Amino acid sequence: SKYDSDKPYSLNVPSYFPKPIIPADNPLTENKVLLGRMLFYDPILSLDSSVSCASCHEQQFAFGDNKALSKKVGHGSTKRNSSVLFNLAFTNSFFWDGRTNTLEATCLDALIDEQQFDIKFVKPRIEKRNEYKRLFGTVYKNENITEDQIIKALATFIRTMVSANSTLDKGKKEGDPEKYLSVAARKGKTLFENEDADCFHCHGGSNNW
C-alpha cells in the first residue's frame, strides 16, 4: 500500500471509570489521534485562519477558557463559557444545554459556530500541506479529504484527554475516595453530594467520580 499502516490507540482508563463511548465507525488509532491533535491546534479550520480549537480550549485551563466568553471568528463572542474537554469519552451529553449527544456532532457544531468552518474553504488549504495529506491518506486510505474525516479526527483526539490523577482519583484507586482529601475537601465533598449545597443535580455523572 502507498499508505503507512495505522495502529490502534490504547486509551489508558482506570478500572473504576465507566466504559468509554467510542463509535464503531470511528475507532481510536494512533495516526488519527495525531491528525486530530494537529487540527485542534491549527487555525486552518476557521474561515479566516484566525481561530483554532485551542484558542478557546487551552490546556492550562483544563482545555477550557479562563474568560467568561470566548472570541469567535469575526470578532464576535460565544454565548456561554467554553466547556472544558477532559473526560468527554465517557459521556453522551455535550454543551451546557446538552444539545448534542455525540462528540462528533459536538465538534461540528462548535466548528461552525465559533470558527465559521466551511469545507469548501478548508479543503484546499489542507491539500497544500504535505503532512496533512500523508496523515489523511494513512488514516482514511484515500486522498479525498472530507468534512466527516476532519470531524472524526478531532473527536478522536479529544477522547484521549483523560484526567485521572486528582487527589480524589488516587483514593478511588485504593478503594477509599476520601483517603487523601483534606478535612476541608471532605466537608466540601459532603456538601457537594447532599441537598444542602445541591451541586450534584447539575454536576453529576461520569465526570464527577
Image (cartoon, rainbow, N blue to C red):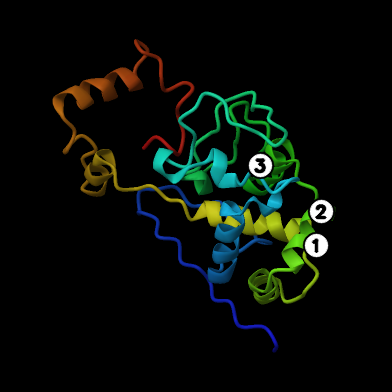
Dot 3 surroundings within 10 Å: few (below 14), some, or many (20 or more)? some
Q: Where's the N terminus, which quadrant?
A: bottom right
- Residue 28 visible in the current orientation: no
Report which quarter residue 11 is drawn in. Answer: bottom left
Disc 1 to disc 2: CB gap under 8 Å? yes
- Compared to 86, does 69 lie above or below? above
Query: Mark 3 vs mark 2: which is more N-terminal?
Result: 3
At label 1, the amino acid type is Pro
The residue to which callout 1 is attached is 124
At label 2, the amino acid type is Phe
Whole-angstrom CA distance, mark 1 to mark 3, is 24 Å
The residue to which callout 2 is attached is 121
Q: Nearer the viewer, residue 158 or 198?
A: 158
In the displayed orientation, state which residue is furthest to the top: 196
Residue 191 at x, y = what percent? 30, 17
Q: Where's the C terminus, which quadrant?
A: top left
Q: Nearer the viewer, residue 121 or 188?
A: 121
Horizontal relation, residue 192 to residue 90: left or right: left
Disc 1 to disc 3: CB gap under 8 Å? no
Disc 3 to disc 2: CB gap under 8 Å? no
- Compared to 40, does 204 lie above or below? above
At label 3, the amino acid type is Thr
Q: Which mark is residue 106?
A: 3
The mark closer to the camera, 1 or 3, is 1
- Compared to 204, does 42 lie above or below? below
Q: Which mark is residue 100?
A: none
